[in-house]
Amino acid sequence: MCTEDSALDAVQSLLDGSLKNTSERHTNVLLVFGAPNSGKSSFALNALLCGLRANWKNTQDSKYDEAVQLLLKHAIRTDFAIAAAQNRATAARMSNYVISNLGVSYQSRPVGTLSAFAFSLISARNKLFGIPSPKLLNGAEQDAILREIVRMHVNHVLQGDSGDCKICSLFNDYFSGEYSKSLQDGDYKSHDSWIYVISQLQNSDNLMDSFDSTDYRNAHNAHNAYNAYNAQNTQDLPINSAFIHQLRDMLARLDEMGIVSESAELQILNSLNFQSHLQSGSSSDLLATLQADLQSSSIANRLRVQWNLAFALRSQYADCVRKKYPNAFRLDSSKLLANGVQILNEIFKSLYDDNTEESSVACDYSADSSKDFSKELFALKCSLPRLLVVDDFHDVTLAGLAFLESLSSLGVRIVLTANPDESVQSFRGSYPDYVVEAAQHGIMQAAVLKICDYRIDGVAESYNDSNDSNDYVDSSNTSDLLKQNSRSIPLSLFSSRVSLSIPSLMPTPTPIARRAWKMANIQGAFPIEKIESNSQETENSSVSGDLYRTAREEMDCVIWQIKRAHLDHKIPWKNMAVIAHDNATVRAFGERLRKDGVPVRYSSVTRALREEPFIKALFALIELAQFSQNSVDNLAKDVSLGTRTISSIARFVKSRIKTIMDSPLIDSDNYNCADLSAVEALMRSIVSLSDMVTSKENSPLSVLIRQWDLLQNQLLNKTDSKNDGLDANFNFDNRIFDSNPNPNSTRFSVDSCYLLIIKALIDSCAIDKSMDCDDFSVDSCDSDLLDKSPADKSPANQTQSDQTTEIFSVLQKMRPNSVHLRTLMRVFKITSKLSKILKQDLAKIQNSETNEASYILGQAWNLCNCAKKWQIQALKNNDEGRLANDRLDAAMRLFEYANSFNYIDSRADYYESSVAGDYSAAAPTITQFIDQVRQMEIEADSLASVAPAPDSVTLTTPSGSVGSRW
């Protein structure tokens, strides 16, 4: 324990270079322990202020002056002192306090995160070495690349090319135990059966084409689905989302553990070779017995397969990133610290290792490998801060620990505050007990200091007051609420019991009660003793607990207590918080509190963009408009070649129309969503009546039948004549695509109605004037469709527009006031208008700097005309308003992602390829964007910034509550 004066003396000794550790050796690292709420963050802020106000002396020599000029030339800023917190929200609040305390600061963000510091270091290195600036891969881009890799190996198996692929062999070994449990003899070959684990149909929403067929709906097992996929394009195989998520997390954990080099990978694999260790005789008898047991079992082999597969996939992932972004420096956020360690090690070798050859960093990224980069590396060393303060050091990963050790080796003074018991990031790769031991006895050899109730004038209060999201306001009514609970105990006693009950994972001779970060051992805390009820002080600092039989009972009771505390005891909503174990529980409480009228603050982004109904409808609308760009002759050619069938075309059109009508994107009067089945009932009635129509009639139905006869003759006119370029031995059998034995049946059916609709869209796109209206109005266009009655005219007087809308005229006569039919006609008119826009403007967009994805999305969104309606609905504090607000939030995320969708990188690729005469690398298209979004599985990738309610209950997780106070 130390006093305030001794704490400040330790910081000053660190700045002066006279700080010594327990071994009486000089050190440049100060490790500060403290019990919970003892002022560690306040101490960190004060240490940063001391560093910012210190009189740092610069080295006066020509080499240093040259390095400074080099930094100025590349606009690289140098900071004397910076601090790092564990999340951006805490860092922002601490920065606000530091800037307000200094009065004037040339640093816009004196407090950041370790990852942000590593990013700035990588940026500085890239500027000095002439490398493109770094840009992080977002979760969706990582997800898409991993899916491409896994799909490639699945295709290897389906195409019979997996024999020479090492990764396919590892996949087979890794999943052998999974698929062998459900195999039946003779069902299929064992060497390709592992694809059944990672190729599933549960997530078929992200597929492009006709998975609405009877074959898919009635598929009872993976074997049937596999046969269907074998018959189709193998590029459309769905990949199990859970496996992709686990793979992405695994690669992140490898980076955070610091396993990034080939030597580190080899060390891991060698450690699993227990047989060589046993033969060397270097282990004890107990360890040898344990290793022999592992070797005799399948555990060791299983671990080797897992690690080999992980390293192989990561290597291929890195290759794919380099190939996909050849003219950019892209990396995962989890790799920032690992890359920072590599850069710092290069600086150390260049400055202190005389035997070091040219920089490997320069060799990897510079075009001129013969250049000497020693000046650049020295300039990079001069750009490092003189003092680095790290708050909550216990939550750093192994890569973060290596980063700090490398900084320490280069002379950076470091102040660390820690309490291993307070760690909330161990589930993401932090090892609190190990890192504090490594800081004391490892490379850093830190001096240790303990603080107790550290406070300086205004720091703690001002810092907490600057927390805009959780302003703490003491309420005298809180004690009245707590006094009602006879089971409450003093908070200090409860905290001490918890603190003294947490053991250390690392062995230490220090008794648990005497460890520097533990709370004081008050009476009844350790060992735990019963406290008489009359001796309890039920004050504001008290705690009580309850046990519940079910989760439903727990939620009911907690919500009841929250509402009673506000209504009866006038406790503000912002002074209350619910901290739950996981995000699913947080969302469950949030939805229930919202329903009960309680304002809450939490992230309501619960599903990926691809799962939003209106976004799926927006994509379906665009795809339908793109499909209507085809001519009937092109469709007929596809049918003759066997790439499409009449039935598959109809299914495509139906699936897109159904997706649009099932969403709130198209206004359906007083209905939230229209029902396509109601329209299909009318279509089936037309089919039933079609057999009774004679060829000589001139009724609307007979006209419709004649239109179908004409269309099917156009689609099948090339089927009878074989293509001269095809071998006569080739027979195209499309029956596997559909349960219908004749997918090109000419009999009038419900599919015929959908084909007539797409024919009407194709014709409307080809007609420039009959259906073009600049002042586009859905209602007016609906009336245009319904007012026309081609059956009342002679065939000579019927225009092409009249003929194309006959299907709607017949349906409307059968059910004049059908809301569902009017919605279908709105879909038709919006799609027709969008198709014309694509036809007129798409070529111009592709040849200009306009972002195609953003432009087409904007056109489709504006045609739907739903933004204003949703904005008005979002103002209401009810379920409808909250749903509208969530939809608008999702729309904002979608458009922000479209604006940034690989645009800069693709433009760079396009420019360089065009200079070389290769125009194949164009800017990303709307189709590529839709494919990308349909592969996005990461719910947390919200790009929207939503302002929370100022007075609301906070719902969060333990990791999200760090730095907050209620």
Image: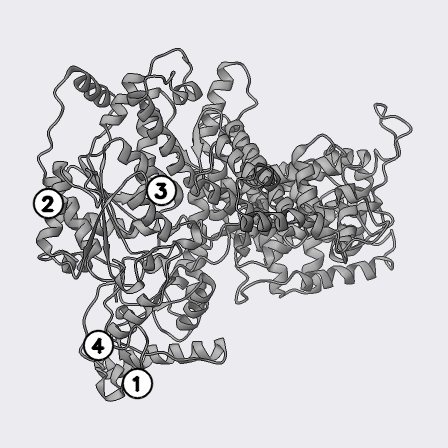
Specify which label sits upstream in the sequence, 3 or 2. 2
- Name the residue tied to disc 1: 485
Badge number at residue 102: 2
Task: Give the secondary structure at mark 1.
Answer: loop
Helix, strand or loop status at disc 2: helix
Counting residues from the N terminus, which is met first, the one under dot 1 or under dot 2?
2
**Cα distance, mark 4 to mark 2?**
34 Å
Is label 3 in contact with label 2 (beta carbons under 8 Å)? no
Disc 3 target residue: 400
- Choose between 185 and 273: the one closer to the eye: 273
Q: Position of residue 397 (x, y in %)?
A: 38, 46
Q: Residue furthest top?
A: 370
Image position, residue 241 (x, y; %): 59, 50
Residue 537: numbered disc: none
In the picture, which quadrant includes the N terminus?
Answer: bottom left
The mark lying in front, picked from 4 and 3, is 3
Mark 4 secondary-structure assignment: loop
Q: Amino acid at mark 4?
A: Asn
For mark 4, what is the residue? 540
Q: Is residue 96 visible?
A: yes
Q: Measure the C-alpha gap from mark 1 to mark 4.
A: 12 Å
- Horizontal side of 150 relative to 419 (left or right) equals right
Q: Residue furthest bottom?
A: 534
Amino acid type, residue under disc 3 in the picture: Gly
Question: Label 2: how many residues lie within 10 Å, few (<14), some (14-19) or many (20+)?
Answer: few
Judged by depth in the image, the label closer to the viewer, 4 or 2, is 4
- Amino acid type assigned to the residue bearing label 2 in the image: Leu
**Residue 164 in which image quadrant:** top right
| Label 3: element kind | helix
